[in-house]
Amino acid sequence: MHVNFFVDCFKRFMNKEGNFEVSLCYDTKGLMSLYEASYVDMGEEILCKAREFSTKHLKASERYPENIDAEEKIIKRSLSNPIYKSLPRFEARHFIGGYKGNIGASKVLKDLAIMDFNTVQSLHKSELSKVVR
């Protein structure tokens, strides 16, 4: 029941022929969201189409010079390692680095994320050293 509602949300981005609207190609953040959401599929055809469409256009967007370096790195990282197929802690370090120079990023939030990451990393090192002994 809930999956049907989720899948129906994608239909508003499709044209009469059942293909995704070409206008979506110009919104990199929207394409990234579509790409990541497509990994929630449980065999739904529309989500398979969403993944094919978004992958194709995200790969094509890597060639455009107007993509800033940080955005291009995020695109490449997501294409090689989608969020839904990875562990959040392993991805945290890459996203913390992506906040550098981001005007919309909260300094307090960034500092908290760095502190959390460093604390967990320290804990893992401590546990690993105990196991190795």
Image (spheres, helix red, strand yellow):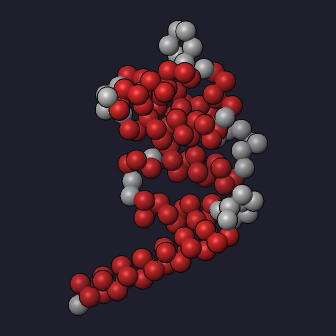
Q: Quadrant of residue 20?
A: top right
- Which residue is found at the position 30% from the left and 82% from the top? 128
Residue 130 coordinates in the image, percent (x, y) = 26, 88
Q: Residue furthest top?
A: 17
Image check: 57 left or right of 127? Answer: right
Q: Position of residue 70 (x, y in %)?
A: 66, 54
Taking the spot 40% from the left edge, 47% from the top edge, the residue there is 84
- The correct choice, above or below, for 67 with respect to 58 in the image is below
**Percent position of residue 80, x then y:** 47, 47
- Residue placed most toward the observer, 38 or 62: 38
4, above or below 123, in the image: above
> Considering depth in this image, is 60 or 115 the residue closer to the camera?
115
Report the residue that reaches farthest toward the front: 1
Q: Vertically, is 89 above or below 34?
A: below
96 lies left or right of 63: left
Position of 101 compared to 45: left or right?
A: right
